[in-house]
């Protein structure tokens, strides 16, 4: 569903977004079987870009973007929060909620921010194994850590200093969860 040319994936996502919003069942949505990333070439797009290379790619963000665009303005924050929450059980949907449009849901911190980091921790081995395939990018593709902008944002909201988020942590996102847990225990 998320693999193909930009135009084909965008069209599929727009049609599906309307159905998802009407059904309002974001957490139970099953995207169906996903194409194994090792079986297909292409980048893993986590946000929009004006420069899209030719060929087929994994447009992980396009369903999230379509949901954001199709949501009624008065309900957009609620819908986006529900979509983000429902996207934390699948690695490819998780990548789709790294796009800038969902930052308002992440910026509220609290349980959703923590759940986003927990999902990043669960998916880290798979996402890191993809190498430098993430976009959008300027000169060269990103690695998994650089692609997880909203995870960085959530960690900052939860109390991790921004300077600590610049380099890929040796232990992946789990390293930051341990730090947060230690900080919480110290305050109890």
Image (tube, helix red, strand yellow):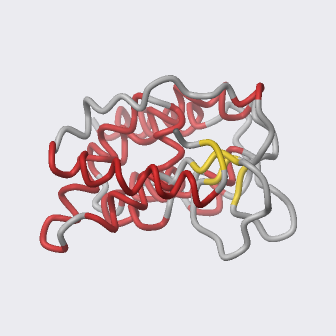
Residue 15 located left or right of residue 153? left
Q: Is residue 42 above or below residue 100?
A: above
Residue 102 against residue 147 in the figure, above or below? below
Residue ID at (72%, 34%): 128
Q: Is residue 29 left or right of residue 97?
A: left
Q: Is residue 129 above or below residue 159?
A: above
Q: Tell me where residue 179 appears, x and y as whole percent.
A: 51, 37
Q: x, y (%) of residue 52?
A: 72, 66
Would you identify the image quadrant in which residue 104 lies?
A: bottom left
Who is closer to the viewer here, 118 or 72? 72
Against 119, residue 137 (above or below) is below
Q: How many marks?
A: 0
For image coordinates 65% across by 46% down, the residue present is 4
Q: Position of residue 10 (x, y in %)?
A: 51, 57
Q: Residue at x 28, y 56 (%)?
A: 80
Answer with left or right where residue 19 lies relative to residue 141. Answer: left
> Which quarter of the rendering shows the C terminus?
top left
Q: Nearer the viewer, residue 38 or 18?
A: 18
Query: 132 or 146, which is in the foreground?
Result: 132
- Residue placed farthest to the right in the image? 139
| Residue 120 horizontal/vertical position (percent) | 52, 36
Q: Residue at x 71, y 31 (%)?
A: 37
- Residue 123, quarter of the rendered image: top right
């Amino acid at each position: 569903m998320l693999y193909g040319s930009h135009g084909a994936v965008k069209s599929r996502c727009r049609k599906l977004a309307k159905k998802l919003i009407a059904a309002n069942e974001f957490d139970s949505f099953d995207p169906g079987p996903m194409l194994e990333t090792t079986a297909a070439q292409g980048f893993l797009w986590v946000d929009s870009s004006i420069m899209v290379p030719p060929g087929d790619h994994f447009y992980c963000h396009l369903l999230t973007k379509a949901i954001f665009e199709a949501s009624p303005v008065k309900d957009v924050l609620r819908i986006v929060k529900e979509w983000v929450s429902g996207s934390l059980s699948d690695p490819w949907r998780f990548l789709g909620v790294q796009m800038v449009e969902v930052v308002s849901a992440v910026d509220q911190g609290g349980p959703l921010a923590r759940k986003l980091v927990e999902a990043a921790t669960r998916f880290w081995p798979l996402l890191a194994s993809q190498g430098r395939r993430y976009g959008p990018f300027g000169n060269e593709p990103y690695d998994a850590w650089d692609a997880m902008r909203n995870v960085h944002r959530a960690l900052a909201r939860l109390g991790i200093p921004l300077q600590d988020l610049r380099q890929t942590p040796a232990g992946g996102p789990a390293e930051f969860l341990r730090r947060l847990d230690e900080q919480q225990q110290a305050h109890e």
